[in-house]
């Protein structure tokens, strides 16, 4: 049986309409619903103010005491104008900060988004050069901290034969990851928006997918719904998991910020996440 680590983002138990849960209670929540691994969401470390290091350190120690692993994190993913050197410099420093947080918590992998250009505006060569310039220093910094980056495919609502979004398909992401010497994160929700056949794309990435983001949508908006609640062809995803020989981190990257802060509602949501993930894993032959 292939070894797969099932996890979900810490943000499924962080924000709610009336405030925030603590990181400590987030760890308790993961234990209660049966999730044995956490994808730490580092898209906004500023939420912790100057105490972020002590908060994250104590969170890691508590997770460890409960047998909950921290295999991956997601770095800041808002993307400023690539032509604005000042904003890109600020963004890169935020990525470095997230990498420092990963090292502090003992997290070995970090997912990062690439710069994306449409083919109607820029060439493939432009896209490669822009990403090499942007990501190379981030990759080297991550290596120095013992963290491996994984680059993620982006969603393209305008995807068409004559207007391709570079960074949305497996060929682009695989080539970029190879040039940078990093891993691949394949996001099935993003691929659904781009209109790709999941198994065909995942086959291209055979043996290369280190993190697999699973979530659902209606094919147009990046809604991050629970798997099987949208239009993603999960039978084809299961086929892709088999054919790509996926053996890594299965991350149920759903959102829950709009859910009530009520504990029972949240716990039911968390248990549904686990149930749906297990359903996919059974389909893919990852569990009996």
Image: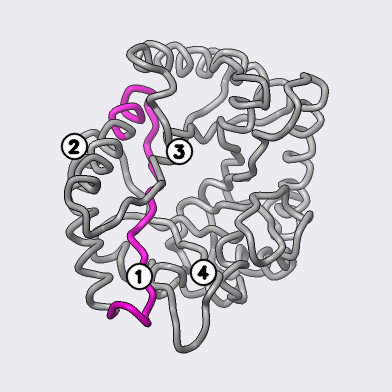
Q: In this view, does 40 lie above or below 264?
A: below
Residue 242 located within the stretch drawn in magenta: no
Label 2 – label 3 distance at C-alpha: 17 Å
Label 1 – label 4 distance at C-alpha: 10 Å
Give residue 269's quadrant in the image.
top right
Residue 165, horizontal then vertical, whole percent: 43, 73
Of residue 92 and residue 207, the one placed in the foreground of this image is: 92
The residue identified by callout 1 is 117
Tell which residue pokes out farthest to the bottom in this image: 162
The residue identified by callout 3 is 72
The residue identified by callout 4 is 156
Label 3 – label 1 distance at C-alpha: 27 Å
Query: Regarding mark 4 in the picture, which secondary structure is present there?
Result: loop
Circle 4 Cα neighbour tier, 10 Å, few/some/many (<14 / 14–19 / ≥20): many
Sooner in the amino-acid sequence: mark 1 or mark 4 = 1
Query: Regarding mark 2 in the picture, which secondary structure is present there?
Result: helix
């Amino acid at each position: 049986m292939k070894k797969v680590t099932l996890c979900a983002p810490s943000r499924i138990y962080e924000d709610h309409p009336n405030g925030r849960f603590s990181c400590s209670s987030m760890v308790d929540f993961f234990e209660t619903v049966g999730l044995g691994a956490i994808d730490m969401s580092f898209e906004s470390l500023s939420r912790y103010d100057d105490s972020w290091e002590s908060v994250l350190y104590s969170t890691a120690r508590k997770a460890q005491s409960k047998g909950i692993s921290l295999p991956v994190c997601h770095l800041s993913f808002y993307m400023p104008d690539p032509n604005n050197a000042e904003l890109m410099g600020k963004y890169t420093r935020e990525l470095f900060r997230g990498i420092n947080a990963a090292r502090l918590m003992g997290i070995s992998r970090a997912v990062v988004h690439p710069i994306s250009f449409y083919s109607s505006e820029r060439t493939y060569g432009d896209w490669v050069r822009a990403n090499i310039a942007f990501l190379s220093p981030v990759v080297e910094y991550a290596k120095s901290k013992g963290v491996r980056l994984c680059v993620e495919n982006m969603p393209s609502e305008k995807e068409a034969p004559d207007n391709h979004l570079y960074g949305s398909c497996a060929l682009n992401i695989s080539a970029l990851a190879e040039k940078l010497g990093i891993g691949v994160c394949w996001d099935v929700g993003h691929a659904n928006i781009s209109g790709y056949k999941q198994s065909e794309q995942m086959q291209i990435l055979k043996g290369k997918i280190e993190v697999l983001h699973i979530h659902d949508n209606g094919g147009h908006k990046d809604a991050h719904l629970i798997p099987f609640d949208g239009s993603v062809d999960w039978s084809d995803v299961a086929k892709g998991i088999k054919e790509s020989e996926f053996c890594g981190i299965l991350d149920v990257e759903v959102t829950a910020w709009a859910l009530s802060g009520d504990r029972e509602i949240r716990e039911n949501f968390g248990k549904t996440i686990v149930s749906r993930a297990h359903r996919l894993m059974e389909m893919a032959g990852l569990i009996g």
